[in-house]
Amino acid sequence: MKKPEILFLKQEDVIAAGLLNMKMVIDVVEETFLLLSEGHVINPPKIKLGLPDNENWTSFFMSMPAYVGGRAPVAGFKWAAESKRNAAVPGMPYGVDVVALSDPDTVYPKAIMDGTLITAMRTSAMAGVMARRMARKNSSVACLVGAGVIGRTMIMAVDEVLPELKEIQIRDLDEKKAKDLASEFSGRINVVPSRDLERSVRNADIVVTETTSRTPFLRRAWLKDNATVIQMSSYEIDDDVLLSADRVAVDNWEQLSRGAGTLVKKLADEGRLKREDVAEIHELVSGRKPGRCGDDELTVACLHGVGAIDVAVASRIYETAIERGIGQVLSLWDNPLWV
Ligand SMILES: NC(=O)c1ccc[n+]([C@@H]2O[C@H](COP(=O)([O-])OP(=O)(O)OC[C@H]3O[C@@H](n4cnc5c(N)ncnc54)[C@H](O)[C@@H]3O)[C@@H](O)[C@H]2O)c1
């Protein structure tokens, strides 16, 4: 009888299996949303456990289950966590995640791996897939707000998808973080630390926010009328940035319009934003709905992350790890009792 063997991949292993290749991750994101549009993905809304509660959390955990069909069907989930206390301690990551994969038929677990870097890569890859369809092809200046973990991968993603990009301005309340991140890319990508958010936004063709801010800071008046805004956290942009957009897209309407504390939920609750007003990312990838239509539109996207992408990226990493003999094999049992 087949024994359930779990491949355990620590962070160094997922790196050795190729995770830091942004192009590969963007390709997996595109493929997965195409599968979703064809009905081969099941992606229930994530369940959030905020401590002390979902509105005022200092720590939270999210369970993000998904089934991804296609060439190599897999079921799995990400157990994602964030801690505001960690953010204040140098060397402690703000987000700490784990991904588990199972065989959809035998239901045996196949792998458990670090999901922290998977989150970092796939989050910005999703923004990249959105930017490809919502931003002007000739975008030459980007302004990224938030020079943390997602800020780093966002530099990689916008550089990958916007071929005419010449400069990335990076802004953080902690100016040293922005400066250090810009230096990290020196000689590869032109990243410039910003000392003035308004000025950077006024110059930008695309603005991406990936901060831990709890209050909106991006003003409509600062934006070019044909800019693209991608919001990665819950509520970083003013209401009228979204409400004045010619085109709005989200990753998952059901999830965002129910998510406590999100801009989309607030506008949906107030009846100012409806499902028919927005395109979901899979509709853009499959061509069922258009992305940007012309160079004069203001386009806005809000992304909150979907578990199917974590599962799909983790599955690709698992396949590569098997091919390359990476990781540690663990057994769930030697002989199952009570079967
Ligand atoms: N949409 C998704 O799928 C997804 C996935 C993962 C993380 N996130 C979100 O992305 C955000 C960033 O995550 P991270 O892991 O990079 O965190 P991080 O702590 O590594 O970085 C966040 C950065 O934002 C900066 N910041 C906070 N408020 C700011 C403001 N008003 N202006 C400029 N900078 C500001 C902080 O100084 C910090 O450097 C979080 O809100 C997280 O919840 C979204």
Image (tube, rainbow, N blue to C red):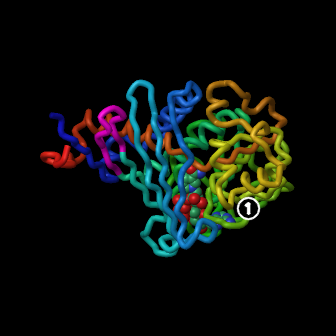
Region rendered in magenta = 101-113
Task: Tell me which residue sits at (51%, 69%) in the image.
Answer: 59
**Quarter for ligand 1?**
bottom right
- Image quarter of the C terminus: top left
Label 1, ligand 1: CB separation under 8 Å: yes
- Locate residue 326, reporting x and y percent: 24, 42
Residue carrying label 1: 197
Identify which amino acid the numbered label 1 is placed on: Leu
Crowd class of label 1 (few under 14; some 14 to 19; many from 20; radius 10 Å): some
- Left of 220 or right of it: where is 318? left
Foreground residue, 75 or 169? 75
* Image vertical order of residue 180 relative to residue 35, above or below: below
Res 155 seen here: no
* Residue 82 on image: x %, y %: 50, 63
Callout 1: helix, strand or loop?
helix
Image side of residue 331 versus residue 292, left or right: left
* 94 lies above or below 28: below
Q: What residue is drawn where x is 45% and y is 36%?
A: 67
